[in-house]
Image (cartoon, rainbow, N blue to C red):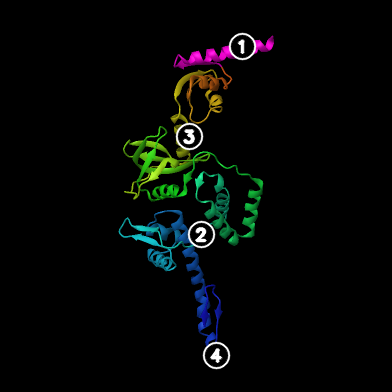
Amino acid sequence: MIWNGWGAVVVISATLEAIEEDFVPRLLADLPIVWQTSTRLLQLLAMLQARRDWSGHDLASRLAVSTRTIRTDIERLRGLGYPVDATPGVGGGYRLGHGTTMPPLLLDDEEVVAVAVGLRTTAGSGVTGIEAASLRALVKLEQLMPSRLRHRIDALRTATVSVPGIGPTVDSEVLGAIAGAIRASERLHFGYIDYTGNQTVRTAEPERLVVWGSRWYLLAWDVDRDDWRIFRADRITPKPPTGPRFKPRTLTDDEAAGYVQRSVGTATWQYRARIRIHAPGDQTRALLPPAVSVLEDGPDHCIIEVGSDTPHQLALYVGLLDADFEILDPPELAEAFVRLAERYQRAAQAFGK
């Protein structure tokens, strides 16, 4: 008798009639158990891939089995080449470890589409050194892809155009080191070059990698400064090893993105001002980038805290709001508005001659 992995039974015997009354019924009765076990293993693997740490009790509860069955299934996964680490004790649990080979991954339809689209758009991502690897991975993915998903991805490809990014790029190995520290909740040690060119060595608890345009930013808790900091990923040089582990802070993706937008937008301001705008706050806020602070000042007025490289640029910027305003601070900003107004007036008078 030969048993294959798909549940098919081939009997090579001249005495089939002699055994079919005993063996075959028992074999068929066991088939549902085999399928249940295979399905549960796939579910268990998907759970381990989705979250870093699981307790045996949580896994057993989710899969509606005993913790003893979970231990048995973990051993089956290890036998298939999946490195599952176990931590003993009351607070122990399971997590996928790092193996010597890459075992198969479980992806649902939406994840497959997301991966394929991401691989196709790496040219404009600001990440260097992954173009050829992305193409190889995409070819492998499309070979196994169902036709329904291939049609969706082809439609996206033909309907979109990617414009290559400009400016600094970040090495894929640097992003990998940062992302690994974030996933493991381990402190990251790295060299950093700030916008003035100064080189420093930093220790931080990495929270998120945030992509804004073609730039990659690390949002992290700076251990030495005891505060949140934003780091350009292309200016980071990781210094392994990472560690020790830390407890991640409860920061949502939207909060992380908003913090980066505000911090990056204000970090380069050389000149700052406070201005009262004669317009409602909601109306004004819709015309400004996230970096500009808008404070309500009654139903028909608001105060903005804004900045730029020079007073002249700031005067131009505020004029685009198309509303009356008052300069609160600094007073010398009025000179920039006077010079701009005189220039506009000369242009208008020259046109009227």
Q: Answer yes or no: do the residues labelled 1 and 3 have beta carbons within 8 Å?
A: no
Which picture quadrant has residue 217?
A: top left
Q: Which residues are magenta?
A: 324-353
Q: Answer yes or no: do the residues labelled 1 and 4 have beta carbons within 8 Å?
A: no
Marks 1/4: CA distance? 110 Å
For residue 261, which numbered disc appears in the image? 3
Does the magenta run of residues contain 335? Answer: yes
Q: Which secondary structure, mark 1? A: helix
Whether 172 is drawn above or below 143: the answer is: above
Q: Residue at x 59, y 58 (%)?
A: 142
Q: Nearer the viewer, mark 2 or mark 3?
A: 3
Q: Which secondary structure, mark 3? A: helix
Badge 3: how crowded within 10 Å, few (<14), some, or many (20+)? Answer: some
Marks 2/3: CA distance? 34 Å
Badge 4: how crowded within 10 Å, few (<14), some, or many (20+)? Answer: few
Q: Nearer the viewer, mark 2 or mark 4?
A: 2
Marks 2/4: CA distance? 43 Å
Which circle's residue, 3 or 4, is located before the other in the chain?
4
Q: Amino acid at mark 2?
A: Leu
Does the magenta run of residues contain 197? Answer: no
Which circle's residue, 1 or 4, is located before the other in the chain?
4
Residue on which the image places disc 2: 106
For residue 346, which numbered disc appears in the image? 1
Q: Answer yes or no: do the residues labelled 2 and 4 have beta carbons within 8 Å?
A: no
Marks 1/3: CA distance? 38 Å
Whether 322 is drawn above or below 129: the answer is: above
The answer to which of 224 and 77 lies nearer the viewer is 224
Residue closest to the far right: 353
